[in-house]
Amino acid sequence: MTVFRDFNFKLLVVEKLMYWDETLSPAFSLREHMRARGVEDLDAYVAEHKLEYTVLDEARTYFEQLEIPNELLATVDELTFDGGHQVFMECAPVWDGEDALFDLTRLDDLELLPNLKLFTGGRALEHMIPGALEILEARGITARH
């Protein structure tokens, strides 16, 4: 089993494979997941439990346990950091993008993506991890701002 060291980095990979490429399936829907557990109004549930600025446990557990085969990891040639990602909405459905909830903390997981050539969101990445652009460059990965 492939182990990611940074949960948020894994979410970027999931975004690419599950929601963009649709090669990692089925696509996770927190609303459907919670509806199956008797929660009809997810927004009300989030507000009632004061979970607006957190990753819901149900989503965290799902994505932490999600196995991504090495064959799929090898298909990832680009990643994008963008606050509007579908995977972020599946984790924190009323998140407003105004905090560091999904910031990356490390780039150790780059080694899991042998064919990564492009990282879009370089300015944001450099803000999250000082020196990140140099790390990407050393690995032959182009950073696009």
Image (spheres, rainbow, N blue to C red):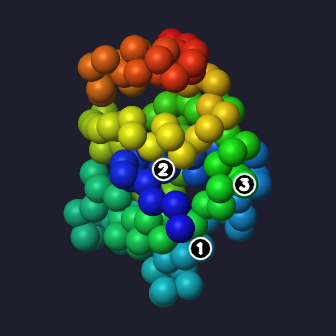
Instruction: Determine contact: label 2, label 3, CB under 8 Å.
Output: no
Q: In this view, does 27 lie to the left or right of 22?
A: left
Residue 10 badge:
2
**Disc 3 element:** helix
Q: Mark 1 points at which residue?
A: 32
| Residue ranking furthest to the left | 50
Looking at the rendered image, the disc whose residue lies closer to the viewer, 2 or 1, is 2
Q: Which amino acid does label 1 sit on?
A: Glu
Residue 131 image point, x, y percent: 31, 17
Q: Distance between the residues labelled 2 and 1?
A: 22 Å
Instruction: Determine contact: label 2, label 1, CB under 8 Å.
Output: no
Few, some or many residues within 10 Å of mark 2 (<14, 14–19, 20+): some
Residue 95 image point, x, y percent: 37, 47
**Disc 2 element:** helix
**Disc 1 element:** helix
The residue positioned 45% from the left and 43% from the top of the image is: 109
Q: Mark 2 or mark 3: which comes first in sequence?
A: 2
Instruction: Determine contact: label 1, label 3, CB under 8 Å.
Output: no
Residue 62 image point, x, y percent: 48, 70
The residue positioned 39% from the left and 35% from the top of the image is: 107
Q: What residue type is labelled 2?
A: Lys
Vertical placement of residue 73 versus 115, above or below: below
**Nearest the eye: 54 or 116:** 116
Q: Mark 2 or mark 1: which comes first in sequence?
A: 2
Vertical placement of residue 90 versus 109, above or below: below
Few, some or many residues within 10 Å of mark 1 (<14, 14–19, 20+): few
The residue positioned 40% from the left and 14% from the top of the image is: 134
